Amino acid sequence: MNSDAPTPSTALAAEARAQCHLRIRFPNLDRPLDFQCERTAGEQFAAILTANRSDLDIVIDADVRPDMALLPCAALWRL
């Protein structure tokens, strides 16, 4: 057995820390807002925002680009 192989729990932790692309579409804006953040922060942010605003379209994917802004105050969304 290879002791260097990731365990399921460390693999999940690494996936949660992985950067993701967060796209938010507000109905009154012409362009979406694109950010990069840790996946757990993006998921928490999206869950809270959509619970309070049903008119938003939020997408989380792996299409991270280096020119994307960081999600402001991302540390607040990591639980």
Image: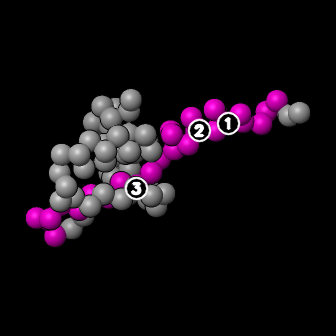
* Label 3 or label 1, whichever comes before in sequence order: 1
Do labels 2 and 1 touch, CB within 8 Å?
yes
SS state under label 3: strand
Do labels 3 and 1 touch, CB within 8 Å?
no
In x, y percent, where is residue 46? 31, 47
SS state under label 2: helix
Give the crowd class for mark 1: few <14, some 14-19, many >=20 residues within 10 Å.
few
Is residue 5 or residue 53 the one in the foreground?
53
Q: Which residue is mark 1?
A: 8
Answer left or right for 62 relative to 53.
Answer: right
Residue type at mark 2 is Leu
**Cα separation between marks 2 and 1:** 6 Å
In x, y percent, where is residue 47? 31, 45
Q: Residue furthest left?
A: 28
Residue 68, visible in the rendered structure: no
**Cα separation between marks 3 and 1:** 22 Å
